[in-house]
């Protein structure tokens, strides 16, 4: 950064010297000096801003890299535990499978027997209730039609 400022100053001095060599008329040294000082200050501010922007971008990249490294390290540490849990779950499933099959074998005849006994009852109930539901449906339709007739026209 210091080298850039020094290089800019040298270039400015060379330009100023070259322009003075061409000019036969005496210049206002104070005005030229103020212009050069202003130009140097502007360049310094521009370089400072660019440097700060670059530092912020580098810090953001470092933060992203640190987060990525942390995630990868965590994944590496947790993966064996996940594998172990999956293996244990598979073992447990294999151990429980005979019990579930045994329970299913015992319960299936009971549920089949229950369904066989209840199905005729539900069918009979449905055949007895169906005429009542049809009658109620017709009744509600009549009530709805009568209610519509009582409403004022829109």
Image: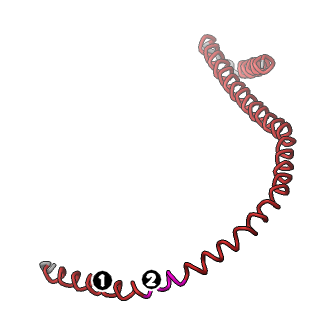
139 or 109, which lies in front? Answer: 109
Q: How is the image coloured?
A: secondary structure
- Of the 4 image quadrants, the one containing the C terminus is bottom left
91 or 79, which lies in front? Answer: 91
Q: Residue furthest top?
A: 30
Looking at the image, residue 129 sits to the left or right of residue 105; the answer is: left
Q: Is residue 90 above or below residue 14?
A: below
Looking at the image, residue 38 sits to the left or right of residue 123; the answer is: right
Q: Which residues are magenta?
A: 120-127
> Does the magenta-highlighted stretch encompass residue 122?
yes
Q: How many numbered marks appear? A: 2
138 or 68, which lies in front? Answer: 138
Judging by the rendered image, the residue that carries numbered circle 2 is: 125
Badge 1: how crowded within 10 Å, few (<14), some, or many (20+)?
few
The residue drawn where x is 72% and y is 25% is: 51
Looking at the image, residue 144 sits to the left or right of residue 35; the answer is: left
| Label whose residue precedes the other's in the sequence (1 or 2) | 2
| Mark 2, secondary structure of its residue | helix
Q: CA distance from mark 1 to mark 2?
A: 16 Å
Which label was assigned to residue 136?
1
The residue drawn where x is 86% and y is 52% is: 91
- Residue 70 location, x and y as percent? 79, 34
Q: Main secondary structure of the magenta part?
A: helix
Looking at the image, residue 108 sits to the left or right of residue 150; the answer is: right
**Whether residue 18 can be seen here:** no
| Mark 1, secondary structure of its residue | helix
The quarter holding residue 22 reads top right
> Does the magenta-highlighted stretch encompass residue 54?
no
The residue drawn where x is 63% and y is 11% is: 29
């Amino acid at each position: 950064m210091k080298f850039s400022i020094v290089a800019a100053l040298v270039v400015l001095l060379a330009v100023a010297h070259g322009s003075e060599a061409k000019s036969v008329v005496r210049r206002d040294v104070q005005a030229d000096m103020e212009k050069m000082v202003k130009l140097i200050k502007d360049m310094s501010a521009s370089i400072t801003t660019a440097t700060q922007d670059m530092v912020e971008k580098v810090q953001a990249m470092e933060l992203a890299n640190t987060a990525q490294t942390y995630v990868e390290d965590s994944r590496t540490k947790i993966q064996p535990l996940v594998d172990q849990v999956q293996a244990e779950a598979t073992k447990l499933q294999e151990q429980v499978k005979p019990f579930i099959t045994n329970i299913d074998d015992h319960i299936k005849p009971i549920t089949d027997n229950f369904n066989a006994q209840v199905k005729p009852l539900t069918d009979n109930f449905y055949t007895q209730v169906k005429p009542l539901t049809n009658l109620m449906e017709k009744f509600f339709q009549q009530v709805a039609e009568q209610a519509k007739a009582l409403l004022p026209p829109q």
